[in-house]
Image (tube, rainbow, N blue to C red):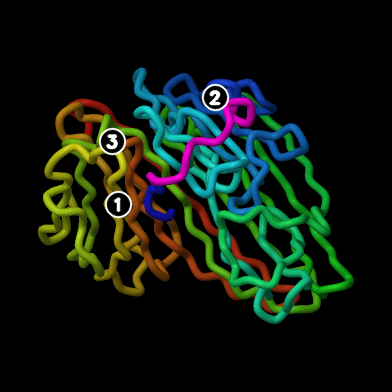
Amino acid sequence: MASAQNTPAPPPANTVKPASSLDNLPHNAISNGIVTAKVYLPGPNGLYQGTRFDRTGVVGHATYKGHNYGQYWFGSQSAAVHDFIWDKGQVTVSTASGAPGPVEEFTTIGYDEAGNGGKFLKIGIGILKRGADKYDFVNTYPVANEGKRTSSATKTSVRLTHDLSDADTGYGYAYVKTVRLVPGKAQMVIEHELKNTGKKAIETSVYCHNFLTLGTGNENVAITAPFNITAAKPFTPGAAEVSGKTLRYLRAVKEGESVTSPISGFGTQVSDYDFKVTNTKTGFGQRIRADQPLSRINFWSIRTNVSWEPYIAISLKPGETKKWTYTYDYFGPGEG
Protein backbone atom coordinates (compact mmCIF):
# COMPACT_ATOMS: atom_id res chain seq x y z
CA MET A 1 0.00 0.00 0.00
CA ALA A 2 1.06 3.56 -0.51
CA SER A 3 1.22 6.11 2.29
CA ALA A 4 -1.93 7.97 3.24
CA GLN A 5 -2.69 11.01 1.14
CA ASN A 6 -3.99 13.86 3.26
CA THR A 7 -3.98 16.80 0.87
CA PRO A 8 -6.53 15.96 -1.87
CA ALA A 9 -10.11 17.00 -1.19
CA PRO A 10 -12.56 14.16 -0.73
CA PRO A 11 -14.37 13.12 -3.93
CA PRO A 12 -17.91 14.34 -4.58
CA ALA A 13 -20.38 12.63 -2.27
CA ASN A 14 -22.33 11.09 -5.14
CA THR A 15 -19.29 8.97 -6.14
CA VAL A 16 -18.87 7.39 -2.71
CA LYS A 17 -20.26 4.00 -1.68
CA PRO A 18 -20.40 3.19 2.04
CA ALA A 19 -18.55 0.01 2.96
CA SER A 20 -21.74 -1.45 4.40
CA SER A 21 -23.26 -1.45 0.89
CA LEU A 22 -20.75 -4.13 -0.13
CA ASP A 23 -21.96 -6.71 2.40
CA ASN A 24 -24.70 -8.28 0.32
CA LEU A 25 -22.95 -8.30 -3.05
CA PRO A 26 -22.69 -11.82 -4.54
CA HIS A 27 -21.02 -14.16 -2.05
CA ASN A 28 -21.19 -17.52 -0.35
CA ALA A 29 -21.48 -17.53 3.44
CA ILE A 30 -19.66 -20.49 5.00
CA SER A 31 -19.49 -21.83 8.56
CA ASN A 32 -18.17 -24.87 10.40
CA GLY A 33 -20.02 -23.90 13.58
CA ILE A 34 -16.86 -22.32 15.01
CA VAL A 35 -15.72 -19.84 12.36
CA THR A 36 -17.89 -18.03 9.83
CA ALA A 37 -16.80 -16.12 6.72
CA LYS A 38 -18.05 -14.64 3.47
CA VAL A 39 -16.37 -15.52 0.18
CA TYR A 40 -17.16 -12.83 -2.39
CA LEU A 41 -17.61 -13.96 -5.98
CA PRO A 42 -16.13 -12.34 -9.09
CA GLY A 43 -18.34 -10.87 -11.80
CA PRO A 44 -19.79 -7.61 -13.10
CA ASN A 45 -21.70 -7.12 -9.85
CA GLY A 46 -18.95 -8.46 -7.61
CA LEU A 47 -17.44 -6.73 -4.61
CA TYR A 48 -14.02 -6.25 -6.20
CA GLN A 49 -13.86 -4.42 -9.53
CA GLY A 50 -10.22 -3.31 -9.54
CA THR A 51 -7.32 -4.87 -11.42
CA ARG A 52 -4.89 -5.10 -8.51
CA PHE A 53 -6.11 -8.02 -6.41
CA ASP A 54 -7.05 -11.55 -7.42
CA ARG A 55 -10.79 -11.43 -8.07
CA THR A 56 -11.07 -15.19 -7.49
CA GLY A 57 -12.63 -15.30 -4.05
CA VAL A 58 -12.06 -12.31 -1.79
CA VAL A 59 -12.64 -13.37 1.82
CA GLY A 60 -14.31 -11.00 4.28
CA HIS A 61 -15.80 -11.05 7.77
CA ALA A 62 -13.98 -14.13 9.05
CA THR A 63 -15.41 -14.23 12.57
CA TYR A 64 -14.50 -16.29 15.64
CA LYS A 65 -16.10 -15.97 19.08
CA GLY A 66 -17.73 -12.71 18.03
CA HIS A 67 -14.52 -11.06 16.80
CA ASN A 68 -14.53 -10.02 13.13
CA TYR A 69 -10.99 -10.45 11.76
CA GLY A 70 -11.95 -9.16 8.32
CA GLN A 71 -13.95 -6.01 8.90
CA TYR A 72 -13.78 -3.32 6.25
CA TRP A 73 -10.71 -1.25 7.01
CA PHE A 74 -12.35 1.61 5.11
CA GLY A 75 -15.60 3.47 5.66
CA SER A 76 -16.39 4.10 2.01
CA GLN A 77 -15.19 3.44 -1.53
CA SER A 78 -14.79 5.75 -4.51
CA ALA A 79 -13.37 5.47 -8.02
CA ALA A 80 -12.30 9.11 -7.70
CA VAL A 81 -9.72 8.31 -4.98
CA HIS A 82 -6.06 7.47 -5.64
CA ASP A 83 -5.36 4.54 -3.28
CA PHE A 84 -7.00 6.02 -0.15
CA ILE A 85 -7.60 9.22 1.80
CA TRP A 86 -8.65 10.17 5.33
CA ASP A 87 -11.72 12.35 5.75
CA LYS A 88 -13.40 13.13 9.08
CA GLY A 89 -11.87 10.13 10.81
CA GLN A 90 -12.81 7.64 8.08
CA VAL A 91 -10.88 6.06 5.22
CA THR A 92 -12.21 6.38 1.68
CA VAL A 93 -10.53 3.79 -0.52
CA SER A 94 -10.04 3.48 -4.27
CA THR A 95 -11.48 0.83 -6.57
CA ALA A 96 -8.00 -0.73 -6.82
CA SER A 97 -7.47 -1.15 -3.07
CA GLY A 98 -11.08 -1.53 -1.94
CA ALA A 99 -11.21 -5.07 -0.56
CA PRO A 100 -11.33 -6.75 2.84
CA GLY A 101 -8.98 -9.64 3.55
CA PRO A 102 -7.58 -12.13 3.14
CA VAL A 103 -7.18 -11.03 -0.50
CA GLU A 104 -4.31 -11.95 -2.79
CA GLU A 105 -2.27 -10.17 -5.45
CA PHE A 106 -0.04 -11.63 -8.16
CA THR A 107 2.72 -9.50 -9.64
CA THR A 108 2.39 -8.53 -13.30
CA ILE A 109 3.58 -10.82 -16.10
CA GLY A 110 4.88 -9.35 -19.37
CA TYR A 111 4.16 -5.71 -18.56
CA ASP A 112 7.49 -4.25 -19.70
CA GLU A 113 7.63 -6.39 -22.82
CA ALA A 114 4.12 -5.35 -23.83
CA GLY A 115 5.02 -1.71 -24.45
CA ASN A 116 2.60 1.17 -24.72
CA GLY A 117 -0.85 -0.14 -25.63
CA GLY A 118 0.24 -3.78 -25.38
CA LYS A 119 -1.18 -6.58 -23.28
CA PHE A 120 0.03 -8.13 -20.04
CA LEU A 121 -1.20 -10.72 -17.55
CA LYS A 122 -2.32 -10.67 -13.95
CA ILE A 123 -3.35 -14.03 -12.53
CA GLY A 124 -6.87 -13.96 -11.13
CA ILE A 125 -7.89 -11.02 -13.32
CA GLY A 126 -6.90 -11.80 -16.92
CA ILE A 127 -5.20 -10.13 -19.87
CA LEU A 128 -4.98 -6.36 -19.37
CA LYS A 129 -4.06 -3.45 -21.64
CA ARG A 130 -1.22 -1.24 -20.46
CA GLY A 131 -0.55 2.45 -21.01
CA ALA A 132 2.66 4.39 -21.50
CA ASP A 133 3.59 4.64 -17.84
CA LYS A 134 5.28 2.34 -15.37
CA TYR A 135 2.86 -0.13 -13.77
CA ASP A 136 0.95 1.36 -10.85
CA PHE A 137 -1.37 -0.85 -8.80
CA VAL A 138 -3.73 2.04 -8.09
CA ASN A 139 -4.68 2.24 -11.76
CA THR A 140 -7.56 0.22 -13.15
CA TYR A 141 -6.44 -1.28 -16.46
CA PRO A 142 -8.83 -2.29 -19.26
CA VAL A 143 -9.48 -6.03 -19.32
CA ALA A 144 -8.92 -7.46 -22.81
CA ASN A 145 -9.58 -11.11 -21.93
CA GLU A 146 -11.18 -12.08 -18.63
CA GLY A 147 -11.29 -15.82 -19.31
CA LYS A 148 -13.94 -18.15 -17.92
CA ARG A 149 -14.96 -18.58 -14.28
CA THR A 150 -17.00 -21.07 -12.29
CA SER A 151 -17.81 -21.48 -8.61
CA SER A 152 -19.46 -24.04 -6.36
CA ALA A 153 -20.07 -24.13 -2.63
CA THR A 154 -20.87 -26.33 0.34
CA LYS A 155 -21.75 -25.23 3.87
CA THR A 156 -18.04 -25.06 4.77
CA SER A 157 -16.23 -24.34 1.50
CA VAL A 158 -16.20 -22.46 -1.79
CA ARG A 159 -14.37 -23.69 -4.88
CA LEU A 160 -13.60 -21.18 -7.64
CA THR A 161 -11.97 -21.72 -11.02
CA HIS A 162 -10.49 -19.30 -13.53
CA ASP A 163 -9.43 -20.57 -16.96
CA LEU A 164 -7.68 -18.32 -19.45
CA SER A 165 -6.34 -18.83 -22.96
CA ASP A 166 -5.03 -15.90 -24.97
CA ALA A 167 -3.76 -16.40 -28.52
CA ASP A 168 -2.44 -12.84 -28.85
CA THR A 169 -0.02 -13.05 -25.91
CA GLY A 170 0.52 -16.80 -25.70
CA TYR A 171 -0.42 -16.86 -22.01
CA GLY A 172 -2.84 -19.35 -20.55
CA TYR A 173 -3.61 -20.99 -17.22
CA ALA A 174 -6.06 -23.08 -15.25
CA TYR A 175 -6.47 -21.78 -11.71
CA VAL A 176 -8.41 -23.43 -8.88
CA LYS A 177 -8.84 -21.75 -5.50
CA THR A 178 -10.71 -23.33 -2.60
CA VAL A 179 -11.57 -21.55 0.65
CA ARG A 180 -12.42 -24.09 3.32
CA LEU A 181 -13.30 -24.05 7.03
CA VAL A 182 -11.90 -27.16 8.69
CA PRO A 183 -14.50 -29.22 10.61
CA GLY A 184 -14.08 -29.07 14.37
CA LYS A 185 -11.35 -26.42 14.30
CA ALA A 186 -11.03 -22.65 14.45
CA GLN A 187 -9.19 -22.88 11.16
CA MET A 188 -9.52 -21.72 7.55
CA VAL A 189 -7.41 -23.01 4.68
CA ILE A 190 -7.06 -21.43 1.25
CA GLU A 191 -5.85 -23.98 -1.29
CA HIS A 192 -4.49 -23.10 -4.74
CA GLU A 193 -3.61 -24.98 -7.90
CA LEU A 194 -2.20 -23.11 -10.90
CA LYS A 195 -1.36 -24.87 -14.18
CA ASN A 196 0.39 -23.13 -17.06
CA THR A 197 -1.70 -24.07 -20.12
CA GLY A 198 -0.16 -21.46 -22.41
CA LYS A 199 2.88 -21.26 -24.67
CA LYS A 200 4.89 -18.86 -22.50
CA ALA A 201 6.46 -19.30 -19.08
CA ILE A 202 4.70 -17.78 -16.07
CA GLU A 203 7.08 -15.91 -13.76
CA THR A 204 5.34 -14.14 -10.91
CA SER A 205 4.91 -14.04 -7.16
CA VAL A 206 1.84 -13.92 -4.96
CA TYR A 207 1.15 -12.55 -1.51
CA CYS A 208 -1.87 -12.37 0.73
CA HIS A 209 -2.84 -8.88 1.85
CA ASN A 210 -3.98 -9.81 5.34
CA PHE A 211 -6.11 -6.77 6.16
CA LEU A 212 -6.42 -7.85 9.80
CA THR A 213 -8.64 -5.89 12.16
CA LEU A 214 -7.52 -6.68 15.71
CA GLY A 215 -8.14 -3.41 17.52
CA THR A 216 -8.42 0.34 16.98
CA GLY A 217 -5.08 1.78 15.99
CA ASN A 218 -3.39 -1.64 16.40
CA GLU A 219 -2.48 -0.66 19.95
CA ASN A 220 -1.27 -3.77 21.87
CA VAL A 221 -0.78 -5.76 18.64
CA ALA A 222 2.36 -7.90 18.34
CA ILE A 223 3.65 -10.00 15.42
CA THR A 224 5.97 -12.93 16.10
CA ALA A 225 8.05 -14.89 13.58
CA PRO A 226 10.29 -17.98 13.72
CA PHE A 227 13.32 -15.81 12.86
CA ASN A 228 14.86 -12.54 14.03
CA ILE A 229 12.94 -9.80 12.27
CA THR A 230 14.80 -7.01 10.46
CA ALA A 231 12.94 -3.93 9.23
CA ALA A 232 14.58 -2.31 6.21
CA LYS A 233 13.32 1.20 7.01
CA PRO A 234 12.52 3.05 10.23
CA PHE A 235 8.97 2.99 11.51
CA THR A 236 6.96 6.10 12.32
CA PRO A 237 8.69 7.47 15.46
CA GLY A 238 7.33 5.95 18.64
CA ALA A 239 4.72 3.79 16.89
CA ALA A 240 6.38 0.36 16.72
CA GLU A 241 9.64 -1.47 17.33
CA VAL A 242 11.34 -4.77 16.57
CA SER A 243 12.96 -6.89 19.27
CA GLY A 244 14.33 -10.25 18.18
CA LYS A 245 11.51 -12.33 16.72
CA THR A 246 8.77 -9.85 17.69
CA LEU A 247 7.43 -6.68 16.11
CA ARG A 248 5.14 -4.75 18.44
CA TYR A 249 3.19 -1.51 18.39
CA LEU A 250 4.13 0.91 21.16
CA ARG A 251 1.02 3.05 20.86
CA ALA A 252 -2.06 3.46 18.70
CA VAL A 253 -1.37 4.48 15.11
CA LYS A 254 -2.81 7.93 14.48
CA GLU A 255 -4.99 9.10 11.62
CA GLY A 256 -2.80 9.81 8.60
CA GLU A 257 0.12 7.72 9.85
CA SER A 258 1.38 4.49 8.35
CA VAL A 259 3.76 1.93 9.84
CA THR A 260 5.46 0.08 7.02
CA SER A 261 8.69 -1.59 5.93
CA PRO A 262 10.08 -4.45 3.89
CA ILE A 263 11.00 -7.26 6.29
CA SER A 264 13.98 -9.63 6.13
CA GLY A 265 15.66 -12.23 8.34
CA PHE A 266 13.91 -15.32 6.96
CA GLY A 267 15.61 -18.25 5.27
CA THR A 268 14.70 -20.74 2.57
CA GLN A 269 12.92 -23.26 4.81
CA VAL A 270 9.13 -23.62 4.71
CA SER A 271 9.02 -23.38 8.51
CA ASP A 272 9.83 -19.65 8.30
CA TYR A 273 6.37 -19.01 6.84
CA ASP A 274 4.69 -19.21 10.25
CA PHE A 275 3.52 -16.02 11.97
CA LYS A 276 1.31 -15.09 14.89
CA VAL A 277 -0.47 -11.74 15.08
CA THR A 278 -2.00 -11.06 18.52
CA ASN A 279 -3.77 -8.28 20.33
CA THR A 280 -2.08 -8.83 23.70
CA LYS A 281 -4.82 -6.92 25.54
CA THR A 282 -7.90 -8.69 24.17
CA GLY A 283 -6.23 -12.05 23.50
CA PHE A 284 -7.66 -12.34 20.00
CA GLY A 285 -5.23 -13.23 17.23
CA GLN A 286 -4.41 -15.27 14.19
CA ARG A 287 -1.67 -17.68 13.18
CA ILE A 288 -0.70 -17.47 9.49
CA ARG A 289 1.14 -20.35 7.80
CA ALA A 290 1.89 -21.69 4.31
CA ASP A 291 3.46 -24.80 2.84
CA GLN A 292 5.95 -22.86 0.68
CA PRO A 293 9.14 -20.91 1.42
CA LEU A 294 9.07 -17.13 1.56
CA SER A 295 10.43 -15.01 -1.27
CA ARG A 296 9.92 -11.68 0.52
CA ILE A 297 7.75 -9.94 3.14
CA ASN A 298 6.20 -6.50 3.23
CA PHE A 299 4.64 -5.01 6.34
CA TRP A 300 2.03 -2.25 6.08
CA SER A 301 -0.47 -0.79 8.47
CA ILE A 302 -2.56 2.26 9.17
CA ARG A 303 -4.91 3.00 12.04
CA THR A 304 -7.64 0.71 10.72
CA ASN A 305 -5.71 -2.50 9.97
CA VAL A 306 -2.44 -4.39 10.20
CA SER A 307 -1.20 -6.20 7.10
CA TRP A 308 1.61 -8.74 7.21
CA GLU A 309 2.26 -9.61 3.54
CA PRO A 310 4.36 -12.74 2.90
CA TYR A 311 5.26 -13.54 -0.74
CA ILE A 312 5.65 -16.89 -2.52
CA ALA A 313 7.57 -17.18 -5.83
CA ILE A 314 5.95 -18.92 -8.81
CA SER A 315 7.86 -20.13 -11.89
CA LEU A 316 5.99 -22.36 -14.33
CA LYS A 317 7.03 -23.60 -17.74
CA PRO A 318 4.21 -24.56 -20.13
CA GLY A 319 2.47 -27.64 -18.80
CA GLU A 320 3.77 -27.27 -15.24
CA THR A 321 1.57 -26.96 -12.14
CA LYS A 322 2.12 -25.40 -8.71
CA LYS A 323 0.06 -25.97 -5.56
CA TRP A 324 0.18 -23.96 -2.36
CA THR A 325 -1.96 -23.58 0.75
CA TYR A 326 -2.40 -20.91 3.40
CA THR A 327 -3.58 -21.99 6.85
CA TYR A 328 -5.23 -19.52 9.24
CA ASP A 329 -5.77 -20.49 12.87
CA TYR A 330 -7.99 -18.19 14.95
CA PHE A 331 -7.68 -17.90 18.70
CA GLY A 332 -9.21 -15.92 21.52
CA PRO A 333 -8.42 -15.02 25.12
CA GLY A 334 -6.31 -17.67 26.84
CA GLU A 335 -5.92 -19.74 23.64
CA GLY A 336 -2.89 -18.19 21.92
Residue shown at 40% from the left, 37% from the top: 86
Q: CA distance from mark 3 to mark 2?
A: 27 Å
Q: Residues within 10 Å of mark 2 (few under 14, many from 20)?
A: few
Q: Quadrant of the N terminus?
A: bottom left
> What amino acid type should be assigned to the residue bearing mark 1?
Phe
Q: Which residue is mark 3?
A: 285
In the image, what residue type sits under mark 3?
Answer: Gly
Tell me what residue is drawn at x 20 percent, y 26 percent.
Answer: 333
On the image, which quarter does residue 138 sit in?
A: bottom right
The residue located at (49%, 24%) in the rendering is 36
Against 37, residue 305 (above or below) is below
Disc 2 target residue = 18
Q: Residue furthest right?
A: 167
**Residues in magenta, as a range:** 6-18
Q: In the rendered view, would you say 179 is above or below 3?
A: above
Q: Position of residue 163 (x, y in %)?
A: 79, 55
Q: Nearer the viewer, residue 289 or 139?
A: 139
Ranked by sequence position, the earlier of labels 3 and 2 is 2
* Position above or below: 284 against 314: above
Residue 30 is left or right of residue 168, and the answer is left
Query: Is residue 12 on the magenta stretch?
Result: yes
CA separation in Å, label 3 and label 1: 11 Å
Q: Earlier in the sequence, mark 2 or mark 1?
A: 2
